[in-house]
Amino acid sequence: MVIGGITPLMLAGCEERVSAVHPAGPAADIIATLWWVMLAGATAIFLLVTILLVLAFRRGGGPSGEAADIRRETVWIKGLGLGFTMAVLAALTVWGLWIGERLLPRPGPDVVAVEAEGRQWVWRFTYPDAPGRMTEDELHIPASRPIDVHITSTDVIHSFWVPRLAGKLDAIPGHVNVLRIEAWEPGEYAGFSAEFSGTGYRRHTFTVIAHEAAAWNAFLAGEMP
Amino acid sequence: MTDKPRLTALRLHKALYPIWRNDPGWKGILTTVNNNTIGGMFIMGATGMFLVGGILAMLIRAQLASPNSAFMGPEVYNQIFTMHGTIMMFLFAIPFFEALTIILLPGMLGTRDLAFPRLGAFAFWCYMIGSTSMIVALLAGVAPDGGWFMYPPLSSSAYSPGINTDIWLLGISFIEISAISAAVEIVVSVLRYRAAGMSLDKLPIFAWYMLVVAVMILTAFPPMILGSLILELERAFDMPFFQAEHGGDSLLWQHLFWLFGHPEVYIIFLPAAGVVSMILPVMARTTLLGYGWVVTAAISLAVLSFGLWVHHMFTTGIPHMGLAFFSAVSTLVAVPTGVQIFAWIGTLWKGRPELHLPMLWILGFFVTFVMGGLTGVMVAMVPFDWQAHDTYFVVAHLHYVLIGGYVFPMIAGVYYWLPVLSGRKRFFRMGETAFWLVMVGFHGTFLLLHWAGLLGMRRRVDTIEAGSGWELINLLASISGFILAIGFALVVLDVAVNAVVAVRCRRNPWNAGTLEWATPIPGPAYNVASIPVISSRYPLYDNPDLPVQIARGEGFLGTPIRNRRETLAVSVSRAEPEFIAVFPHNSIIPFAMAVVTSIVFLAPVFKWWWLMFAAAAGVTVLALCWVWQGGSRQDEGLLDAGRGLSLPTHAEVPYPPGWWGTLFLLLANSVLFGSLLFGYAFLWTVAPNWPPPAILQPGFWGPVLAIGGGAFASGGIRLADRAIRNEGASWLGLLASLAGLAGLGAGAWTIFAGTTYNAHAYDATLWVIAGYVTFHAGLAGLMVLFLTARIQAGFISARRCGDARVVQLWIDYAVLVAGLGLGAAWLPGWLP
Amino acid sequence: MKDILRLSLPLSVWIAAFSGVYGLEGVVCSDRGAGAGLGLGQGRAVLVVAWVVAIAVQVGLIFGLRTPRFASAQPWVQRVSMILACVALVATVWSLLPVVTTSLCL
């Protein structure tokens, strides 16, 4: 509730530049929806538990005896403890997995591949569509097209994270992980390395620049830095 | 009650006290094996570590209070947050509940001490030496700085030269020896050392929780110990377990670490849940609702918690189906948690709750822990975790769970059991003020940090940047953090003052029903003057005279005629009296052993290998002295145990306490070995740069020696065991098993000869497997020699054959791991 | 001690089955699995069979722990062990359900 109340305050500044709850692409968007629904549900459950606790102090104790205890076990343990929690959790689990499925990097005709290589403390990006192009700490992508970022590392573990576009995925030496991102609009989006990597960790950041179709083609042709 | 029974009780006390008391003076501290003394020192040590960890937390909050802070550079800050996490998890949380358990458990179970008093002392001294070393490293500026989960390659020698990481790996492994020792002691105590009639359905609920937790420690810590061991091998000898270019994989560390790390969270939570389950019914003037369901929930939670380690690795690129399994278990584990929460609330509804200070803390626990649990379910959702992982959302979540779910109930427990611990009841009333300071401070610090995380604030950044949008939240968190710290400091002060100078109180001031309130307070060295017979979960409610009857010696072993430390051991399930356990006297060996063991772990930090081997030899000698002290050179037969019952001593039963301790130690050991085989299989399947350039060919002699050796070793000890029981000559069997163990060792040696230890992760893994097998063959061989000496010295007879059974267990284990380990090592060479 | 085994067996079988299926999924999706000529269709079939077997074992345990031979003489232990066996069955169904609902190797 407190968190919800503060949102408008935060929107006033430029803070949403790095915010996971101010999505600028489909993946971040559906995750933000998941978050708001879970926040509402969690608040409701928290209030329920609090009310039950408070009521326990307002009552004068119930009937005693074995029959009363068996009745209490049915209500509190089988009903609330097992029934209620399992119903809520089953629904949430299924929904979470369904969202996860939608975010996977499935092949498609429109998909653009780029490569990201983390190292202490630089990100290098290369583009299979434009062999030989390499940018440092700046990833260029076309807007409103699905992008598969092929992520790896040359030294320690890093993590590729553009909060407004999608969740994060680790850069691990010897492995290549694929993350699907997409930006609705052209623009600049802040990116971080999100796995602790030593003394330069805080400054290990990058920018994602999403272009309109024409500008993207120009970039591939080598016209832009 | 007239004067007469009191006289009897006093006389009994005067007879028992000299038998059980510590040595006088300072020497008494070093030689004590008494659970009350050890537990008291343990709890003070752990509280000291909580204060150190708290000071580090304040430094962190000072650094993050304002943007672009110049207070600390990243080199220092990285050490501070790494040590904050390490200290709170390993040096405070686990030792603190172990300490509380060591003090309370004998009283609750109605017995005189825990099963292995010297092991408890050893655990304490290992902990004290290990944690002191870590603090010294911190003060010397060479503290670990890779984050408390030490991911390689960052923690490998290429990216972390210097001794910082070695101190972590070796220091923490050493402290885990302490945790495992305490766990073995707790398991065997709960299973075998109880009041007569305290069958499994009548165990105090805290004992159930601690049984579960101790088994979890035995099964969760070994993967981490293995991980530390092989990472240290990589750092010291360049064996490439985690180096991708040589077939290693840094993900292996993450699996091993979180195989430990997630159960660890529940290892910390369950004791707190046990404390809540003990206190809450007393505060509500009733009994626990759904005892059987709560036990079921604790067991389910324990096992389920071993199926969620990958939820710390949702962002490592594991396929979605794999993540889905762990996401599903992560939500499922919330069900037994929910069962416990609702059982507790139902208990409050059933009774008439009163708002004493312990109850206040439990309410704080409810509010905070439920919120932490709910955010926990959120991060169990794979997509949400992709955003929240490694941000302050997770930092806030884990503090809600650990402080709300662990620290608050523990404070409730300390206030509740203060009369047992100190003999005094609360007089100075700082506690309520401290409670409210902590509540306001805690939620002020951590609630909004969730939001900072969603706004993109990563954990472990060394400062925040101006214009990031996190400044206000962090300033508020820092101010609240200092309020929280003042609150905790007041709690510690309040407890200390009340424990030292408050008024003495009568026995059982809360009118509780369990046995820890049946003894005089604070508990005398022997805990119970005689071992009671009970018939329900709340014996003091059935029989308010029970404390007097215990004190008058009306239970078992109520007349200390044999002038030695004795207690009753019962059958596991029904708690029928089975034998008399004779406890060791005060001894310097646990302390000496801890000192020498610490050298084994600390010498490699400085690459002083000769010192390490010398210390290892010292540990062996001390261990032999340790086990030599037990037992008897003649058969005692059946002895009077009181109440008309005659029982043998533990030396004259086929499966003595030492056998039970060995069994659970081997459980932990087998998990370590299983983790090793898992690592081997993991590297084969997932690691880059496989298969290795050269695969070991098994040849002829290796397998033949191993198979033959295994048969001789197992067969020989059985032959010897039969000879002992028939009063025959056992030398032939002992010799055969010794030869067999040598064969096993020789079989394993062929692997060393056929591979190069640092060529590839494959070779390195084979060396560890072969080394493990060789070590166990050697250890079992040493035990055979020890058994031979015991036979020569007259400690073994047809009735006193327990030692042989223990050795047999170790030999069978060595044969088993040789078969599995060497088989796995040779398998690829046999395949076409 | 037998009573302790009765209480711990079903969930121990669950954790073994769970780890086994997770390991199997790792093999199916690894380069080594693909190298051995294991297609995704066959891979899923293997996983589903493993899941069904795990469920069958749990159902077997529930019935087995009721028989006079394996039941506990203590009613309380018997009741708790039956609940734990049911917990293990639910855990097996719930935790491995993704083998039929989730994409393989993506």
Image (spheres, rainbow, N blue to C red):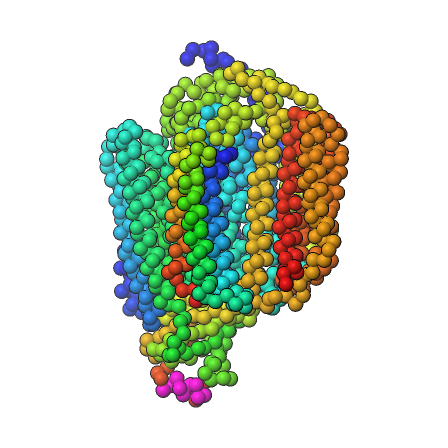
- Give the tally of numbered discs: 0
Question: On the rendered image, what quadrant is the N terminus of chain B found in?
Answer: top left
Question: Is residue A220 on the magenta stretch?
Answer: yes
Provide the residue span drawn in magenta: A214-222
Residue B373 in the image, given as x and y percentages of width and height: 37, 50
Q: Residue B640 location, x and y as percent?
A: 57, 17
Which secondary structure dominates the residues rendered in magenta? helix
Residue in the foreground of this view, choosing between B231 and B53:
B231
Q: Which residue is drawn at 59% across and 63% down?
A: B248
Left or right, B373 with reference to B49: left
**In the image, is B206 to the left or to the right of A26?**
right
Location of the C terminus of chain B (image quadrant)? bottom right
Vertical placement of residue B414 versus B675, above or below: above
Q: In this view, does A45 lie to the left or right of A191?
A: left
Rendered location of residue B626, percent (x, y): 67, 34
Closer to us: B466 or B782: B782
Quarter of image, res C11 = top left
B556 up-or-down from B822: above or below: above
- Residue found 69% across the figure and 22% down from its top: B634
Q: At x 73% / y 30%, what residue is drawn? A: B791
Whether residue B69 is visible to the viewer of this picture, yes or no, is: no
Question: Is A91 within the magenta?
Answer: no
- Relative to B740, A81 lies left or right: left
Query: Which quarter of the picture shows residue B606?
Result: bottom right
Vertically, is B689 above or below B88? below
In front: A41, or B749?
B749
Q: Can residue A9 be seen in this view?
A: yes
Which residue occupies 72% across, 43% down? B740
Q: Which of A95 and B740 is in front in this view?
A: B740
Q: Residue B209: which quarter of the image? A: top left
Q: Position of residue B831 (x, y in %)?
A: 63, 61
